[in-house]
Image (cartoon, helix red, strand yellow):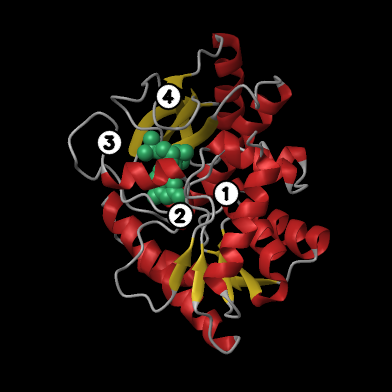
Amino acid sequence: DWTMGTYREEAIAKIREQVGTEKVICGLSGGVDSSVAAVLIHEAIGDQLTCVFVDHGLMRLGEGEEVVRLFRDHYNIPLVHVEAQDLFIGALEGVDDPEVKRKTIGRLFIDVFEAEAKKIGGAAFLAQGTLYPDVIESVSFSGGPSVTIKSHHNVGGLPERMNMRLVEPLRELFKDEVRLLGKELGLPEAFVGRHPFPGPGLAIRCPGIITREKLEALRKADAIYLDEIRQAGLYDTIWQAFAVILPVKTVGVMGDGRTYDHVCALRAVTSVDGMTADFYPFDMAFLGRVATRIINEVKGINRVTYDITSKPPGTIEWE
Ligand code: XMP
């Protein structure tokens, strides 16, 4: 009889065997996967583990503080908080290609992890919360030809040159199993129930060129949208919901003036594993409420659309 309790014990034994007495750096993204990986590895090897949370300036509103609070204060797991906003946003300047965004972010993550590894006298391993669907989707699309759709990886496409070996204790699991494991490890219910969030963060929710102004508007719109989803009691029914800021400006009218601002697209899907997904059929009153709030409260956005594409043929993220 196979249970998460058994998985936990086996995974801990495997981590100990793989790592020996070496040090491990775990990149925390704020998402469920890397958090579960971190807590599991911490159980296995204790203070041989150092968690590193890199704030790349592409996090959602308030996300950085939440992660730090959970790990440092609630779990008492040592956490290095790297403020790398300028580094990442600077490197992404002028970049509009989604794969170049992923590769740029992946390379910088590795640079930061390697620098942190050096500070603790060297770490032989880098831990990540890679799941089974990440492994499949970076190689081929289910049922389709063997082409890379997106260089999915928890850090957004790992560069070939990396001095650390990988520890990926969740590689065989699907999202629902990771959530069960998270509960088994005592992570708060609300935390394991969080929607997935991609490693490259808001960079891939800002199609086209990324600017600080667009990121700021996107963060606010996204927070309003999720706030309304929670208030409507829909958060747990939806697999993933988020706002996207489009590289298109349209004309609007506000008060007695003309506006010329960005379009915001809202996305919400249901799914079991992220490999296929259906758009969520909100009622129009809900969407109208969210649109009104976003346009009234967010500077730089004057139009809201709802994405009714399922996966396939769309993907969940826009990039
Ligand atoms: P797509 O957009 O391919 O996404 O349908 C499926 C799931 O994977 C997430 N995703 C990523 N996660 N790095 C990640 O860590 C990435 O580069 C990446 N791209 C997409 C996406 O949010 C969804 O949950």
> Is label 3 in a helix, a strand or a loop?
loop
> Is label 4 in a helix, a strand or a loop?
loop
For marks 4 and 1, give the CA distance. Answer: 19 Å
Type of residue at label 4? Answer: Ala
For marks 3 and 2, give the CA distance. Answer: 17 Å
For marks 1 and 2, give the CA distance. Answer: 9 Å
Type of residue at label 2? Answer: Asn
> Is label 1 in a helix, a strand or a loop?
helix
Q: Earlier along the polypeptide chain: callout 4 or callout 2? A: 2
Q: Mark 4 near mark 1, Cβ–Cβ under 8 Å?
A: no
Which mark, by number, is residue 141? 3
Question: Where does the image place residue 312, in percent across and percent down from the top left?
Answer: 31, 25
Q: Earlier along the polypeptide chain: callout 3 or callout 2? A: 3
> Is label 2 in a helix, a strand or a loop?
loop
Instruction: Note whether residue 261 is visible.
Output: no
Which mark, by number, is residue 277? 4
Q: Mark 1 near mark 3, Cβ–Cβ under 8 Å?
A: no
- Choose mark 3 or mark 4, whichever is in front: 3
Q: Earlier along the polypeptide chain: callout 3 or callout 4? A: 3
Disc 2 within 8 angstroms of ligand 1 (CB): yes
Which mark, by number, is residue 33? 1
Type of residue at label 1? Answer: Asp
Q: Earlier along the polypeptide chain: callout 1 or callout 2? A: 1
Q: Quadrant of residue 189?
A: top right
Disc 4 within 8 angstroms of ligand 1 (CB): yes
Disc 1 within 8 angstroms of ligand 1 (CB): yes
